[in-house]
Amino acid sequence: MEPVAVAIDAMGGDHAPAVVVKGVMEFLSKNPDTHIYLVGKKREIRRELRRISRSAMDDRLRVVNAHEQISMREQLLSYWRKRERTSIQQALDLVRKGTAQAMVSAGNTGAVMALAKTSLGMLEGIGRPALATLIPTAKGKTMLMDVGANVDSRPRHLVEFALMGKVFMQTVHGVSNPRIALMSIGEEEGKGNELIKRTYAILKSMDINFVGNIEGREAYLGESDLIVTDGFTGNITLKVAEGVVDVMMNLIQGEVRSSLQSRLGVFFLKRSLRRLRRRLDYAEIGGALLLGVNGIVVIGHGCSNAKAVGSAIDLSVRMVRERVQERIAAEVRGMRNVLEELSYA
């Protein structure tokens, strides 16, 4: 198997570089066909590597020094002048030059998106990038996109999101004919704002497996493989779900400690609860995909642990091996006649 090279923003995330380095080393120990470029402040990275002390993997690991980092809350005007010296930009440059085939960062999402778009450019035929993530459902996992790259979208953008998400679910998750749904306030065709109504009509006319509108309460039932929406709605949908999961897990823990009977019950349910936690754990998914840019970019959660870092790297490697970028480009070319009739107005 051909090796895959991935550039990692070692300074990205709430617990970087420690958890990033740990996640990288754990991933390398199980994946001999991957090469890693750790980009960031060399002295700090080396210190973490010495702490782990796994010199046997040095031939698959390179440290690239970056003098600056972008903090999680830093705004565009603050980091733009120093961008060329930052770990995010230098990791993206490795992809742009062809040294690495994918980039992973758990850093500032807005900065990664902005710098990826300016550094890598867009795939031909795609107007805007979209953030896509897998969400747990009653029947497995469903892709939700956009979850924050675009606050305002046009029908053509949502159509492009549908095509990109369709290719990802086919190639990486083996869903031969993904069921594509459109997020709205009702299942009926006429429900929703002007954006949703216009997009519905276009998707319905296309040669795809469009299953119609889906309401927020149905998003997690697993009745679709891909849910398309604008970034404003998608981000709220995702964040509400994350909050509900956190509250539910805390409530369960509180009930478990409330009595001896509860603790005994949990003893017998331990395996089931473990499986449930795994299904709901963001670390199993790894991160969100920035689809549409001319390069593979995975953006992890800011509070990513080592397991989440490894999952994000694994996701990026699978995208490289399945040639997702090339297949998205081919899908867009195949729908050129439809897309050319749609403006971005």
Image (cartoon, helix red, strand yellow):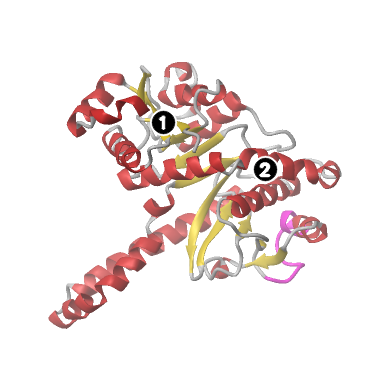
Residue 52 x %, y % = 20, 34
Disc with the residue nearer the chain's start (1 vs 2): 1
Query: Dot 2 corresponds to which residue?
Result: 327
Tell me if residue 16 is in the magenta stretch. no
Q: Is residue 6 left or right of residue 13?
A: right
Checking the image for residue 239, the label placed there is none
Gap in Å between the C-alphas at discs 1 and 2? 24 Å
Q: Amino acid at mark 1?
A: His
Name of the residue lying farthest toward the left: 260
Mark 1 residue element: strand
Q: Residues within 10 Å of mark 1 (few under 14, many from 20)?
A: many
Residue 120 visible to an observer of this rendering? yes
> For mark 1, what is the residue?
35
Q: Residue at x 68, y 61 (%)?
A: 177
From which residue to which does the magenta span run? 187-197
Under mark 2, the amino acid is: Arg
Residue 112 percent across, percent down from the top left: 49, 32
Quadrant of residue 131 in the image?
top right
Residue 190 highlighted magenta (yes or no): yes
Residue 79: x, y in percent?
Answer: 45, 23
Residue 126 position within the rendered picture, expressed as x and y whole percent measured from the top left:
71, 38
Figure check: 67 above or below 277? above
Q: Element type at marker 2?
A: helix
* Along the line of sight, the residue nearer the viewer: 281 or 182: 281
Q: Is residue 183 above or below residue 257?
A: above
